[in-house]
Structure formats: structure tokens, C-alpha cells
Amino acid sequence: DTGVSQDPRHKITKRGQNVTFRCDPISEHNRLYWYRQTLGQGPEFLTYFQNEAQLEKSRLLSDRFSAERPKGSFSTLEIQRTEQGDSAMYLCASSSPDRVDTGELFFGEGSRLTVL
Amino acid sequence: AQSVTQLDSQVPVFEEAPVELRCNYSSSVSVYLFWYVQYPNQGLQLLLKYLSGSTLVESINGFEAEFNKSQTSFHLRKPSVHISDTAEYFCAVARNYQLIWGAGTKLIIKP
């Protein structure tokens, strides 16, 4: 069990560029979540997957955001035409089948995005 | 709708003093409650959880939290803090498949 890993840890980009973040969950976890966290706030839910199926997307997730989990293992979160308001920490978390109902999540260290 | 309120954005406390971090939630149904901790430059980690049973739950590093249904609270306490407890603490309530989070409380330990 190597934990949830996210890449890159930091990304600085210019407004209008596209960025992609990757998350590798704990191997036996079938649920994968993306959250966004800004300074002074708790994490905000973006979307989650059960295996390869994306089951819910938050209204926070505009059409510039897309997430995939093609083989039910790792996931990517792409932001197109980035805006300064997209600057935040993007958190990935996973959950095992026996802990799904209790809401216990295992988090990666996050990917910090800075849009100039 | 469920929500979580952490009233204090920062709590400064002297080392070896007791501390309480407050958390109130709103929910009309049974809840699962969590405290997560985020140490500097690290990811969120589960500190402790209340699912059912005893209303007093403890963590391995000396924190405890008490579920109080009548006051809809889940305050986090530690009788004696250490410099290594410096972190941000988040309270959360589970709603189906996801967590609803408070805004977090930064615990600042003064030497």
C-alpha cells in the first residue's frame, strides 16, 4: 500500500493554457474522488468515480473541466483554458468498498495549481 | 441540507496546554462524523471518526472527540498539546458517498 499519489505536485501555468493532473489511488480502492481546496476553505467536492464510471459531477465543475478514469485505476483531471480563479489545490482521494458508506477517504498530497 | 461549521479559523495555544477545536453540524438524519488533519505540506489524514456506538472516540495520538447529538456537535479535544500537533484540522460529515467539510481550524502551538 503506497497510498494515493498525485502528479505533478505543483504546476504554474499562464492563463488560457491547458493543464492535466494525474491521480493514482490505492490499488484495491474502487472509488476515486476529486476535490478542490482554496486557502482558508475546506475541500470542495468536484466529482467521483466508481471503477471507471463517473457517477457525479459538482456544479463547480464547469465545462472546462473534465475527469476520466479509463480503466478504473488511475484518473486524470484536465482543465482547459485555465483562468486565474482556477488557482487552487486539487486533491484526489480514494475509498475502499467496505468503507464507502462511512465516508472514510484516503487523500493524496494534492496538486497545487497557480494560474498567472 | 447538511453543513459543517468550524467556528474558529485559528486557535493559538501554549505547548502542553489543553485545546478544544469546535465543530457543529446540521443534519436531520443519522450522521457519520470525522476529523481530518493536514500537517504542513502534507495531504489530509483521518484523525478519528464517529460511526456508531460510544459517543467518545479517540485517536492514537491523544486526541478525542465526543459526539453530542442534542447539541449537534463533535468537538475535538486534547489535554496537552505538543509542537508536533501544529496543523490544520477539518471536521466533516458524510453524506452518502461524499464528505461535507468545515472550513478548517489552524492549531498554532506557542512555545
Image (tube, coloured by chain):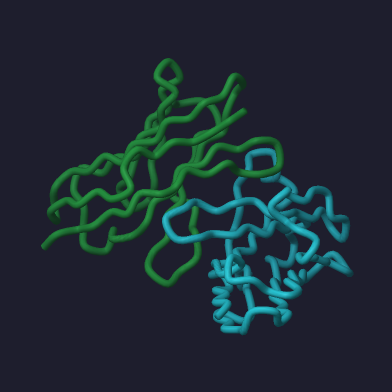
At 63% from the left and 57% from the top, the residue drawn is A35
Query: Where does the C terminus of chain A fall, quadrant-wise?
Result: bottom right
Whether B81 is drawn above or below A84: the answer is above
Query: Where does the N terminus of chain A fall, quadrant-wise?
Result: bottom right
Left or right of residue B55: residue A3: right
Q: Where does the image place residue B95, in percent across and percent down from the top left?
A: 65, 35
Of B63 and A19, which appears nearest the observer? Answer: A19
Q: Which chain is cyan?
A: A
Based on the displayed image, in which of its 4 quarters is residue B94 positioned?
top right
Left or right of residue B54: residue B105: left
Q: Where does the image place residue A105, in percent across and percent down from the top left?
A: 61, 52
Of A91 and A115, which appears nearest the observer? Answer: A115
At 51% from the left and 41% from the top, the residue drawn is B92
Left or right of residue B56: residue B79: left
Whether A6 is drawn above or below B31: the answer is below
Whether A2 is drawn above or below B100: the answer is below
Q: Where does the image place residue A83, in percent across and percent down from the top left?
A: 64, 71
Q: Colour of chain B?
A: green
